[in-house]
Amino acid sequence: MQKCKHPFNSIQVQNTGEIYCCCCYWTDFYSFGNIFEQSFDEIWNGERAQAFRRQFLENQYKYCKLDVCDPYLPQGDFEPQLVCEYPKQIEFSYDRHCNVRCVFCRNKADAAEEEYNRQKEKRIEENFDKIFTPVLEKAEIVELNSAGELFASRHSIEIVKKIININPNIKFKIISNGILFTKEMTEKLNLTDRLMSVTISVHAATEKTYNKLVERGNFNKVVENIKFLSELKKQGKLDNLQLNFVVTSVNYKEMEQFAEFAKETGATAFFINYHRQIESDELERELDVSKSSHKEYNNLVKILQNPVFKDENCFVCDYLKNLKPVKKSFFDLFKK
């Protein structure tokens, strides 16, 4: 197995100050250290960081959830070392402010949690320049925001401004639901010439299906903004445009149409299986059409045989690729 780059050139910052090499959920919450308690040098090349890298060099990957992470391992030629230069990529992935509610995401607001997060964000904002200037000056890429919606958050918008002020040459990888990712917002934040990669979470090819999955969304605005981003890509101002589609029982029949839309816009259609924990076990069973026990499972398997999913503009996660048809009894047809 090729080595993943993240432990050697990337960090993820959480609002608690904890520093991870990538998604904390996928690395069993293995923290390199806390930025409010240690210097960055102590964290980045400290004992915990070196211990994590050592097991990578020995091909152990014992802290990683390879069942969900393996398809996304960034590959490439580089020399992995126990002691590394400052990271090239920094991910700020903690701001949970969002302007929509998706049925397969966190669909309930918690006032106490929101207040807790506000206090943590305030602490980061107040100490941002002091803590992150030395790191950002040497970084090449900043990634925002896999936890919420960047453009719906005053805090994240301020962080973007601070980052550009520290390093005007920085490039951004942005994850968004696309509603507020307008041409006007892009220009206002001086992002037009600083975009490296944009991922838009859409999950549907029609407004009707989108509205079933995304509360308070705006499908037509998302499509409009995707077309704007598509133009940036054509102009060479955006390297990669990706459209995400979490496969559920609500939307799976639109996968082929979604793949075609992505191709028309010069984007990559990115299909992943539903794997989030939500409040209702019954709702989870109903949504997860990729489970062989679901009554529509074989329909999904049949759709996945379409050659469109082998096109270079399509990525289908290994879990979905490996689904096989199962025999169903008469009574299975009446199950959820």
Image: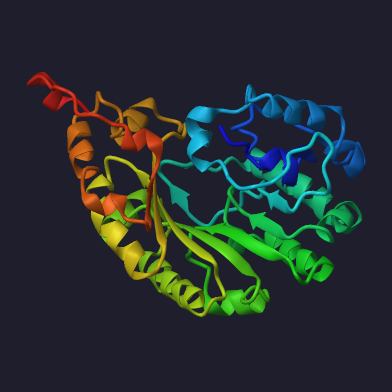
Q: Which quadrant holds the C terminus? A: top left
**Against 132, is 45 above or below?**
above
Looking at the image, which residue is at 46% across and 35% down? 276
Side of 192 relative to 20 (left or right): left
Residue name at image x 69 percent, y 57 percent: 142
- Give 251 or 75, whichever is nearer the viewer: 75
Would you say 290 lies left or right of 103 here? left
The colour scheme used here is rainbow
Q: Is residue 109 above or below residue 239?
A: above
- Can residue 205 be spotted in the picture? no
Locate the N terminus and report the quarter of the image it occupies: top right
For residue 321, which quarter of the picture? top left
Image location of residue 49, percent across then percent down: 80, 32
Res 249 → quadrant? top left
Residue at (75, 68) in percent of width and height? 161
Residue in view at x 40 percent, y 68 percent: 266
